[in-house]
Image (cartoon, grey):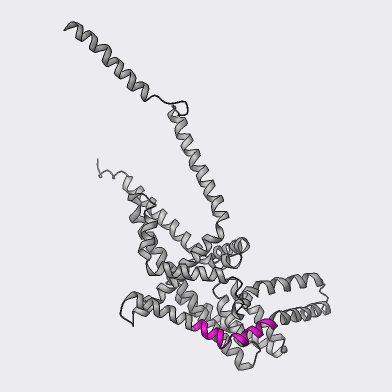
Amino acid sequence: MADSAEHSVPASAAIQGTATKAHAPGPTDIADRTICQEAKKAFVWIGIAALVVLAVFLAQPLLVIFGGVVFASLIEGGQRLLGRIMPGPRALRIAVVLLAAVGFLVWLGYFAGNQIAAQAAQFPHIIEAQAQRTLGWLHGHGIDVGQADVSKIAEQVIGGVGPVTQALGGLFGGFTTFFLIVILGIYFVLEPDIYRRGFAWLFPLESRPHFQVTLQRMGKSLRMLLFGRMIGMFTEGIATWLLLAVYGVPMSALLGILTGLLVFLPNIGAPLSGLLMVLVGFSGGTDMGIYCIIVYLVVQTVDGNIIVPMVAKKTADLAPAMVLGAQLIFGVLFGILGLALADPIVAMIKIALERQAERNDGDRDDSAPEAAPAGT
């Protein structure tokens, strides 16, 4: 018995030594806990930097995907409004909204396309002629402006409205991008729960309820923001077209559609549409130019002081300077698509930051110690 006990002790010691040796750190493992934590932090920052670089390279596809989300929000808002007067399955209302949009585009292409295309072809020549007249007037009043400066400004103005007039005239330079946005928007709006759950799975289990609420707020804010834009586009476009057509201003239909489309770009669209309207007006004489200025001021005053404030009460509360800055940055980086999507992107970022602040406040309240009773 004694011999067996003596032999059992070395055997257990050998087994323990083998286990210790099996779990010992290898030559590539970091044994120091502090160094291991710092390495994890470094890997996190490297991963964030890699994601930023990847986002820069994939900026255009990401904007197209977000454009699909915006288009899906437009369809969803339309079917919800239609649901108030048209009970029935949701898919049927979505089909009605899409058919109405397709019908409008067909009407615009077949019945107004030729006229608008011809007017769009004359548009750059009118702008250039008016720029030359403005240059002559400035020289006559002692203001020295170089020909190269005016030509450069005219090229920038023509280049800025070129994509819009091309789209209106049927020359869809970005047809592929537009087609992808429409297809993605249809997929998103038909089965939104699939994509919502898919994004939620990327988050930890305890963060998914918070993420779901954030998505709901983002969706509601985006729909209301786009609803306000659509009201402004419709009212300003129709009012501009009718008021210009009454006086006989040339290209009144094109100017009305351009004004309506440019309303989608707040802070930038209105001055640009007004500049184009005034240039076309002065091509027909001083009286017509003054009338176009009055039309622009009246339309912008009514829309800015009556329609927009009424809609803005239920839409995203965005600071104008922040939106303008985002438009300038996105416009320079990503062109007209970034300029058009800058406003919704800022609204989504704002909601995400607000939700994170609410979550941090809630965690701080939960972790705060209870106040001691009075008199203790």
Q: Is residue 133 left or right of residue 93?
A: right
In the image, residue 239 sits, relative to residue 175, either above or below, namely below
- Count all numbered tags in the image, as a single digit: 0
Query: Does the image show residue 295?
Result: no
Q: Based on the picture, tell me whether residue 240 belongs to the magenta stretch.
A: no
In the image, residue 135 sits, relative to residue 37, either above or below, namely below
Q: Is residue 316 left or right of residue 331?
A: left
Q: Is residue 94 left or right of residue 330?
A: left
Q: Residue drawn at (27%, 12%), measured in percent from left and top?
A: 10
Choose between 174 and 203: the one closer to the eye.
174
Quarter of the image that includes the C terminus: top left
Q: Based on the picture, tell me whether residue 116 belongs to the magenta stretch.
A: yes
Quarter of the image that includes the N terminus: top left
Q: Residue drawn at (43%, 70%), measured in percent from left and top?
A: 186
Question: In the rendering, at what x and y percent does residue 169 appear?
Answer: 61, 81
In the image, residue 161 sits, relative to residue 208, either above or below, namely below
Q: Main secondary structure of the magenta part?
A: helix
Question: In the rendering, at what x and y percent does residue 314 appear?
Answer: 42, 72
Question: In the rendering, at what x and y percent does residue 6 appear?
Answer: 23, 8
In the image, residue 36 sits, relative to residue 256, either above or below, namely above
Q: Residue drawn at (47%, 80%), measured in percent from left and top?
A: 101
Question: In the rendering, at what x and y percent does residue 341 appear?
Answer: 53, 66
Choose between 118 and 303: the one closer to the eye.
118
Q: Residue furthest left?
A: 1
Q: Residue furthest top?
A: 2
Chain part drawn in magenta: 104-122
